[in-house]
Image: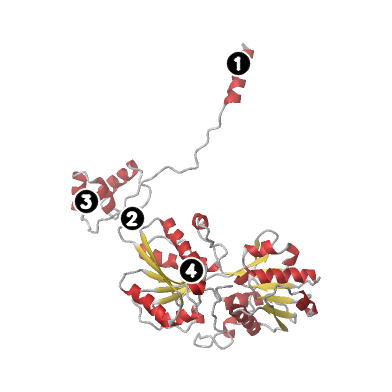
Amino acid sequence: MRKLIGLILLYTLVNAQIQLLSPIPLPSNVIVDLDVEEYSQEELEKLLQEGQIFTFLAKSKDINDTELASIRQSYMTLFNITQKIYSSETFKVAFIVPYKIIGKYSYTTSNSVLAYLLNRKVPFKMELFPVEDESNSTMQTALESLSGSTYDLVVAPVTLKGAEYICNQNLNTEIYIPTLHRNRVDCTNDMVSFGGIDYGAQIDLLSRLVEYNATTITVSDASSISKMLSTLVEARVDVNESLVLNRSGYYKDLIERHEDLNQSTIFLNTPVVKSSLFLSQLTLADFKPMQVLSTQINYSPLLLTLTQYHDRENMVLASSIGSLDPILSENISLINQDIRFNWLNYATVVGVDSYFSAKTAEPRVAKEEFVNGSLEYDIKLYEAGLYRFIPKELPTLPEDENITDIYYDDEGVLNESYDTFHSDMSE
């Protein structure tokens, strides 16, 4: 008998199957409110009497009557309506895209916003108005084509030239420019807002890491953004030398002619590919900088791929990219767009999120707010680690130093040391 019971238990264990809950969520229903009319409490009660249950549910979301609210909740549970009941009001956004000027960003910014809006699950309308360039006539035509429509927001990822033209127009729709910080444009138009990062603020933070009497060297190339970054560094710290990299990608001879690169503090202001080549050739020349500092321009996983760890061992980077809802980030990555490291995509989504929330009363997914017409970002420092960027503790600011005085006058206007930024999107 014992043998029989043992055989039965053995058979049961061998053939037993583990029962796990499915990770796939149960389906739920959503009611889209397409009726523009408002209903009184008496009319809602009549809808119930006539059996128009779904109309009742769509129009009773703000009901104050306790009994009707209880009935509504019972039907919501019965029909498995777990999501919000959306109104017929849609969020309308348009894009002015100078595709020959900003290149690949003409579709990455709009695609990122499209994924964002799909993720919010609220009715929306999105239109693209591609333009070849940012000439006055082209920009005027684009703005005129928008004048007959009622958009909640127009997104214009333009450079300085396009931004200056937009700021000087009489606008009836708010325009968001994610490519520039407001301080880089002389703009008094209240209908225009900006989302670009503040490179000057990033360099202010990095400059706190520079030791007293350290040999400080800037490294740039011929691009406008690289020159602008080096100018900002020179306005903040005492720079001993400024190196300019050529387009060949071979820098070993240049490095060997500047032995003071060894044990120096380097502000690396070149795009990520040139930066990676420069760092690897520093190692090849057997030079070891005391520290390498860089802004958002090199905050990219490509840096970790193109360099070895000992090439970037003493490297610190500044980034203004925050964190968004992880599900949103994954959904955006599903369409091959990046908001974790691509600051322009991130800035575009964050700006649209602010306007979207104001229009629909939906909760925000980003924490950045507009301050004086420009998004204000928290700046974080990262060390270029073995496999990832590792957060670094922020250095404290001396009590007797006001870093804003370096670039701004008493009226908050940039002085001449802050070079006008014209972003070279081809980099």
The label on residue 86 is 2
Q: Quadrant of the C terminus?
A: bottom right
Question: Residue 388 placed where, x, y %?
Answer: 66, 60
Q: Amino acid at mark 2?
A: Tyr
In space, the residues marked 3 and 1 are separated at their CA atoms by 65 Å
Mark 1 packing: few (<14 Cα in 10 Å), some, or many (20+)?
A: few
Please provide percent x and percent y for residue 238: 69, 84
State the image quarter where residue 246 is shown: bottom right
334 or 198, which lies in front?
A: 334
Q: Earlier in the sequence, mark 3 or mark 4?
A: 3
**Residue at horizontal 55%, vertical 66%?**
342
Q: Nearer the viewer, mark 2 or mark 4?
A: 4
Q: Nearer the N terminus, badge 2 or badge 4?
A: 2
Mark 4 — residue? 106
Q: Nearer the viewer, residue 117 or 160?
A: 160
SS at circle 2: loop
Please report whichever mark, 3 or 2, sits nearer to the chain's N-terminal start: 3
Choose mark 3 or mark 2, whichever is in front.
2
Query: What's the distance in space between the residues labelled 2 and 1, CA to CA?
Result: 60 Å
Disc 3 crowd, CA 10 A, few/some/many (<14, 14-19, 20+)? many
Helix, strand or loop status at disc 1: helix
Spatial separation of the CA atoms under disc 3 and disc 2: 18 Å
Q: Residues within 10 Å of mark 2 (few under 14, many from 20)?
A: some
Residue under label 3: 44
Earlier sequence position, callout 2 versus callout 1: 1
- The residue mark sitting in front, 4 or 1, is 4
